[in-house]
Image (cartoon, rainbow, N blue to C red):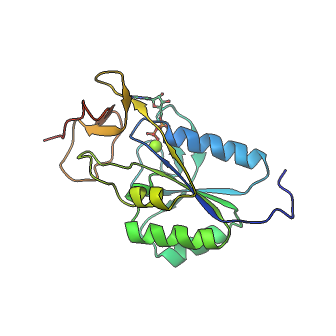
Amino acid sequence: MVSKNHKKIGKLTVIAGPMFSGKTGKLVALVEVFTRMGHKVLTVKPAIDSRYSKNEIYSHDHRKTPALVVDGLSPDHIIDAITQQGVDKVIFDEVQFFDKEKVLEIIRKLKKLGIHVIASGLMYDYMRKPFGATPELMGLADERLELMAVCQKCGNLARHSERVRGGKFQVDVGAADKYIAVCERCHKIYK
Ligand code: ADP
Ligand code: MG
């Protein structure tokens, strides 16, 4: 169990990788282990990600945990909602979908409050361009973990998400219906 005298030191851990690289599964496992150790954990996700479940983070292989759903609120509002729960760890999934400046501010402030923030997201969009706050958070992170998927074209390790169906906007939420994981050599920009 976590000792009562345990000194709260804020830090930022970033978990990045393409779609299907196991980010959400890893977060669910972390929630389970941290909770068992006596930590108070809150998971946050953007409202736009309603692919499998509205109020949970839910992995492609059906691992899940409840989440606070955040939609366009001010940073102070979100920080209040988080701190009211008396948590010492906050997990953000799909961090690339949050407003970049707002989520950077929220994470900076949470860290100052002594909270361990774990942020997970896509580094690149379907055009291999930086996606939202993830690359900047990678730079700011105290700990970073880059996950890989398997390239669905050649079987090598995959760092990219290829859109195979859908529109041309940067954000077009989907799963295996719209995306495959691919390596840089196999990646094609959807047209
Ligand atoms: P992410 O949050 O990074 O999209 P998830 O944790 O939701 O990833 O899902 C990871 C799971 O996706 C894997 O455990 C595996 O069952 C499945 N999967 C489907 N396609 C692939 C792929 N191309 N490479 C690796 N895992 C894949
Ligand atoms: Mg995910």
Q: Nearer the viewer, residue 38 or 123?
A: 123
Using the rendered view, name the quadrant where residue 6 is placed.
bottom right
Residue drawn at x 21%, y 42% as measured from the top left? 166
- Residue 81 appears in the picture as rendered: no
Q: Nearer the viewer, residue 82 or 131?
A: 131
Pinpoint residue 120: horizontal percent, then vertical percent.
Answer: 49, 51
Q: Is residue 173 left or right of residue 80?
A: left
Residue drawn at x 30%, y 36% as measured from the top left? 179
Q: In the rendered image of this protein, does residue 26 appear above or below residue 111?
A: above
Q: Quadrant of the C terminus?
A: top left
How many numbered dots are placed on residues in this image?
A: 0
Specify the quarter for ligand 1: top left
Residue drawn at x 42%, y 56% as measured from the top left? 134
Q: In the rendered image of this protein, does residue 76 appear above or below residue 140?
A: below
Pinpoint residue 79: horizontal percent, then vertical percent.
Answer: 57, 72
Q: Nearer the viewer, residue 58 or 188?
A: 188
Q: In the rendered image of this protein, does residue 50 appear above or below residue 84?
A: above
Q: Is residue 92 left or right of residue 19?
A: right
Using the rendered view, name the quadrant where residue 29 is placed.
top right
Pinpoint residue 59: horizontal percent, then vertical percent.
Answer: 50, 38
- Residue 182 appears in the picture as rendered: yes
Pinpoint residue 155: horizontal percent, then vertical percent.
Answer: 35, 21
Residue drawn at x 85%, y 50% as measured from the top left? 1
Q: Which residue lies furthest to the top in this view?
A: 154
